[in-house]
Image (cartoon, rainbow, N blue to C red):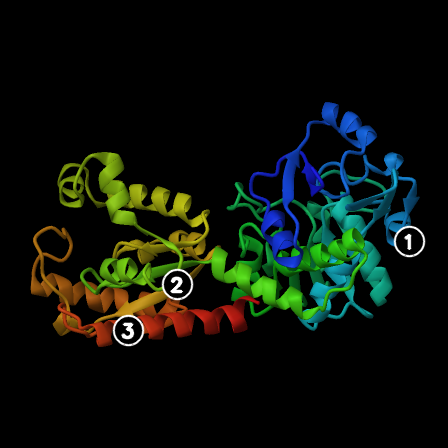
Amino acid sequence: MEYGLIGEKLGHSFSKIIHEKLADYTYELCPLTKDELDAFMTAKQFKAINVTIPYKQDVIPYCDMLDDSAKRIGVVNTIVNRDGKLFGYNTDFAGFLYNLNAHDITLKDKKVMICGSGGTCKTVTAVAEYMGAKEILVVSRSKKENTVTYEECIRHKDVDVIVNASPKGMYPNNLESPLDLSDFPNCKAVVDVIYNPLKTRLLQQAEQLGMKAVNGLEMLVAQAKFAVEHFLSTEIENNKIDQITQDLLKQLTNIVFIGMPSCGKTLTGQALCKYIDKTFVDTDAVIVERSGMSIKEMFARHGEAYFRQWEHDVIEELSKQNGLIIATGGGAIKNEENIQNLKQNGVVMFIDRDLEHLLVTDDRPLSKDADAVAKLYEERYPLYTKYGDLRVPNNYPMEISQQELDELMNTILEGYHEILCHQWA
């Protein structure tokens, strides 16, 4: 391996994608156990590497030289092999600072609360000190020197900025959150260094409460850019960070369709695959395949609650994935947790078809006649408008022309890219 990443678990790392967009080399993921680390570092069979959890401090004794950030923070995430001597750097500092500045978050004279007391906390603390924070509060699961516990931190209701530097909420434990942000009414901005999922539960709550919410994806790209500059002794324009972050968002985010039965979610999703490089999946089809029953049969044999549990579980699973087009069942919006799950990696689009254009079909248990469809429409329409990030009118005929299809796809894609640029980046 010439260039790559070492760490314990690397299965969901985006670093290979990012580095190969930044530079013309092959970047490898090299998971190591603690027992394998010494042999790897001693052999020095690499040109340059990045280091991630849990080895950012363990690699320091192997380095012959450390840059100022690495010395001050005591954490190394970048190592360059120059003629057998290992030079250690910390580019997380510059990456986190870049992320804050890119989103107009200043820590000067602010009270900053950091969740987690590990290596990432050290980097965040150093940046907060550098920016002139008035007070820095570190929250830890257990009582340690210079920290407060999660039970104690809620007394600090005057916190201005909260940073999650812990793994709480990271894949696969997407449902977790380190804090209830309603305990901190003075907070104006929340930064989560996690980037998988793209919007943790913490960030979703921040948005709901009107706080600025920023994930760790841009920090990841920025620190990689600064690492490549050390790898190759070169300079890269900062606009590459923004460009690659946008490219990643387009690649990773899901497009989710909600709307009434027969509004066109499935047909639209299947057609969209020809316009954008994503994989289509229909939650109802997954339920039918896995359960061995049609939706109508499941309702008849087990009732709606049984079906809704199936629906919830399938949505929870699919929502953790990236690069999908997801068509949901018409009633998925009845459970708010479904929406939270879908929005952690997805842009939710409401396919809005007027009532007179909706079909009555015998295979849909809750919309088997015109009166039932009208009742559902009245009940659910406010939820569709509430949860949709974009409303997509779809009163096109069932036998849609190519021109009409192109118009519909352009509406979806233009709205999708607009949302990514202004609400996600």
Seen in the image, is 384 located left or right of residue 199?
A: left
Which disc, if any, is residue 348? Answer: 2
**Disc 2: CA contacts within 10 A as few (<14), some (14-19) or many (>=20):** many
**Disc 1: CA contacts within 10 A as few (<14), some (14-19) or many (>=20):** few
Considering the numbered disc 2 on the image, is that residue within a helix, a strand or a loop?
Answer: strand
Tell me the amino acid under the disc marked 1.
Answer: Asp
Point out the tag, 1 or 3, that comes first from the N-terminus.
1
Q: Residue at x 11, y 50 (%)?
A: 363
In the picture, which quadrant includes the N terminus? top right
Which disc, if any, is residue 68? Answer: 1
Q: Residue at x 9, y 61 (%)?
A: 360
Q: Residue at x 65, y 35 (%)?
A: 30
Distance from Cα at disc 1 to Cα at disc 2: 44 Å
Q: Quadrant of residue 156?
A: bottom right
In the picture, which quadrant includes the C terminus? bottom right
Seen in the image, is 304 located left or right of residue 324?
A: left
- Residue 178 in view (yes/no): no
Q: Position of residue 423 (x, y in %)?
A: 52, 70
Q: Quadrant of residue 203?
A: bottom right
Tell me the amino acid under the disc marked 2.
Answer: Val
Distance from Cα at disc 1 to Cα at disc 3: 55 Å
Q: Nearer the viewer, residue 187 or 385?
A: 385
Q: Nearer the viewer, residue 70 or 31?
A: 31
Point out the tag, 1 or 2, that comes first from the N-terminus.
1
Q: Comparing marks 3 and 2, which lies closer to the viewer? A: 3
Seen in the image, is 354 located left or right of residue 348?
A: left
Seen in the image, is 338 located left or right of residue 296?
A: right
Q: Comparing marks 1 and 2, which lies closer to the viewer? A: 1
Which disc, if any, is residue 406? Answer: 3
Q: Looking at the picture, does residue 318 appear above or below residue 94?
A: above
